Structures are given as C-alpha cells and as structure tokens.
C-alpha cells in the first residue's frame, strides 16, 4: 500500500521556504519532495557563495545592531552607572512624557512637510530635461546635474556657514554695505529652520533626479506620439501622463523622504548651537544627544527607546502612505 504524501508544516515549511529563497530554487509541485541533490547542487552552492558576503554583512551590520538596539531599549544605564538595569517600558514612558521630546515633534513635523513639498522641484526639473528634444543638450544637462555629486554634501553645508555667518557671512556683508541690518541666520531660533531649508537650494537632488529620468526614459515612445496626436498640452501631459507613469519611482523616493525627515539629525547637528536649541531640536537630534557622553547628559536606554519609537513611527507612516498611494504595474 502506497504511503500518503504529507505536506511539511510549521517550522519545517518555513525553513524550506527560506532555503528556496536563498538558493533561488522554485518550490516543488504538490506531491513531490525537494531532493537534497538539487538543493545542494554545484550551481546552487556557487550561487549561495556569491550572496554569502552580502548576507553576512546584512546580518552583522544591519540586523545584529537593530535587534541589539531593540533589546537594550528595555534597559537603563549611563556613563556613571555602566551596569545595565532592566526597566521594562520605563524608557518609553520617559520619552513620551518628556517635554523636550514633545516640543521637538513640532520641528520634526516642519521638516517633514517642507521636505515633502520640496520633492516637487526635482520632479519638475526632470520633466523639463526629459522634454528637451536635443539628445546632446539633454546629456549636457544631466552631466551638469550630476557634477555636484563628486563633492560631499558636508562640504556644501559647511560652505553655507561662511555665506550665512553673522560677522563674516557674505550675505550679511552685502546687507551691511547696502545700509541694512545684519540677520542672525544661524543664531535666531525662529529663523534656523528656514535657514536649513535655504541650504538646500536649488532643491534638486541628483540621485533622485536620475531615478525619475530612468522612469521617464523607460516609457514607450508611442505614448508620447499618441498624446501629441490627441493634442495634449504640456500641463495636462504632466498630470495625466508623466506624473502617473513615474508614480512607482515617486513612491520609492517618498519612502526615503519620510524616513529621513523623521529620523535624520545630521544637518541639524552641523548647525546646532545653544542659542537655537528650541528651534532646531528634533527627535533624531535628541536621540543623538542622549547617546553620547560628551553631550553632557547621556541616557543610553532613553536613546535606544527613542530610536525604536522613531523607527516604528517612520514604518507606520510609510505603510499607510503606500496603502493609499497605489500604482498599477
């Protein structure tokens, strides 16, 4: 009597799916078993060796620190009390009831909304470049767009300090020569947020622009010919064709903007000084200040808990956005 075939269940089925994914093997059809000889064939093992460095790097430098941070968010310790003490959800309660954290949310919201609005100049720039008929001119503009990529972004941010400085800044020197008062771009808590946005001029990201241009160039030429025959104007073409057809690239960049606006603190740290504390403090910068002893008041458990909260907030907002912002393949 022939034995009935039983499908793998539970942990065994999960391990098999992981094996299929890692070795790039199609799952066996129902009623057939996975032969070990096929799973561990020479071709499969060679493929696994090629992906092993990337897999090991992700496990060590991405997943390892992330899981370690989640675990340490339930402990508290400082440089004066280096022994971790388990406190459960106390760190999360401290973060959510901290007045400084609550006030920093306003600054985070400001940068989030501003960064979302400032996605538009890059899109418009790419559409204008794509509509240039001359291939040589289009190539020249792409080269000029990518040239600033060879200079680190930190150099541009530090350059703006010499342009906006109160005593030595070029803009203030021009204002004084015109008989106008100097402006404290970097020392006024009411102006510092706008100053940070100003340093992004012309608000066009080369990396993002290349993604949009790749999406536009991938669209069939017949689409544009049909639009021309139908008498579609430039504005209608943008809203009815170009923007919907690069919605996939837009979603990709949107995820990056959302995550960066909620968690980043690099530019705020560069322009930070005590006089603009209330105007520039964001949750990400607060997390940084709580994580390093040289900031004066380290609280490592608080920092880990805040980092986990920011991750969950960014993940939730991204999932909700992706849910309502659908695209068709």
Image: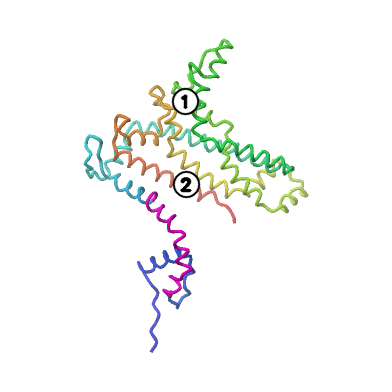
Q: Identify whether 104 is placed above or below 70.
A: above
Q: Residue at 43% of width from left, 28% of height from top?
A: 280
Q: Quadrant of residue 8?
A: bottom left
Residue 34 drawn at (x, y percent):
43, 74
The main secondary structure of the magenta stretch is helix
Residue 84 drawn at (x, y percent):
23, 43
Neighbour tally class for label 2: few under 14, some 14-19, many 20 plus, Cα within 10 Å: some
Q: Which residue is at the front of the view, 215 or 9? A: 215
Q: Which residue is mark 2?
A: 318
Under circle 2, the secondary element is helix
Region of the chain picked out in magenta, as a range: 34-62
Neighbour tally class for label 1: few under 14, some 14-19, many 20 plus, Cα within 10 Å: many
Q: Identify whether 316 is placed above or below 51.
A: above
Under circle 1, the secondary element is helix
Q: Which residue is at the front of the view, 1 or 44? A: 44
Residue 9 drawn at (x, y percent):
37, 70
Q: Are marks 2 and 1 in contact (CB under 8 Å)?
A: no
Residue 60 drawn in magenta: yes
Q: Identify whether 271 is placed above or below 177.
A: below
Which of disc 1 and disc 2 is earlier in sequence?
A: 1
Q: How many marks?
A: 2
Labels 2, 1: front one:
1
Q: Which residue is at the front of the view, 96 or 9? A: 9
Q: Which residue is mark 1?
A: 192
* Mark drawn on residue 168: none
Q: In the displayed structure, does residue 44 sit left or right of residue 293?
A: right
Q: Identify whether 264 is placed above or below 57.
A: above
Q: Residue at 39% of width from left, 82% of height from top?
A: 4
Q: In the displayed structure, does residue 92 sit left or right of residue 226?
A: left
């Amino acid at each position: 009597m022939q034995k009935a075939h039983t499908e793998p269940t539970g942990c065994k089925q999960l391990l098999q799916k992981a094996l299929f994914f890692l070795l790039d093997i199609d799952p066996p059809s129902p009623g057939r078993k996975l032969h070990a000889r096929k799973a561990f064939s020479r071709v499969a093992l060679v493929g696994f060796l090629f992906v092993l460095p990337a897999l090991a790097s992700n496990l060590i430098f991405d997943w390892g620190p992330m899981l370690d941070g989640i675990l340490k968010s339930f402990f508290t310790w400082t440089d004066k009390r280096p022994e971790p003490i388990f406190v459960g959800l106390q760190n999360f309660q401290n973060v959510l009831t901290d007045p400084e954290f609550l006030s920093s949310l306003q600054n985070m919201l400001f940068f989030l909304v501003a960064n979302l609005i400032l996605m538009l100049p890059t899109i418009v720039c790419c559409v204008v470049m794509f509509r240039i008929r001359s291939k040589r001119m289009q190539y020249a503009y792409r080269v000029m767009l990518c040239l600033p990529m060879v200079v680190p972004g930190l150099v541009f941010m530090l350059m703006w300090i010499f342009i906006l400085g109160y005593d030595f800044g070029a803009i203030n020197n021009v204002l004084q020569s015109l008989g106008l008062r100097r402006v404290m771009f970097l020392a006024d808590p009411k102006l510092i947020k706008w100053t940070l946005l100003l340093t992004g001029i012309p608000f066009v990201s080369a990396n993002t622009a290349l993604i949009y241009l790749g999406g536009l160039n991938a669209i069939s030429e017949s689409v544009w010919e049909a639009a021309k025959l139908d008498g579609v104007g430039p504005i209608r073409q943008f809203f009815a064709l170009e923007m919907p057809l690069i919605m996939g690239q837009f979603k990709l960049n949107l995820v990056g903007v959302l995550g960066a606006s909620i968690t980043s603190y690099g530019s705020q740290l560069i322009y930070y000084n005590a006089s603009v504390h209330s105007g520039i403090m964001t949750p990400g910068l607060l997390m940084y200040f709580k994580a390093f002893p040289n900031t004066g008041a380290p609280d490592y458990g608080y920092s880990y808990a805040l980092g986990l909260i920011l991750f969950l907030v960014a993940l939730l907002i991204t999932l909700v956005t992706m849910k309502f912002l659908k695209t068709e393949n």
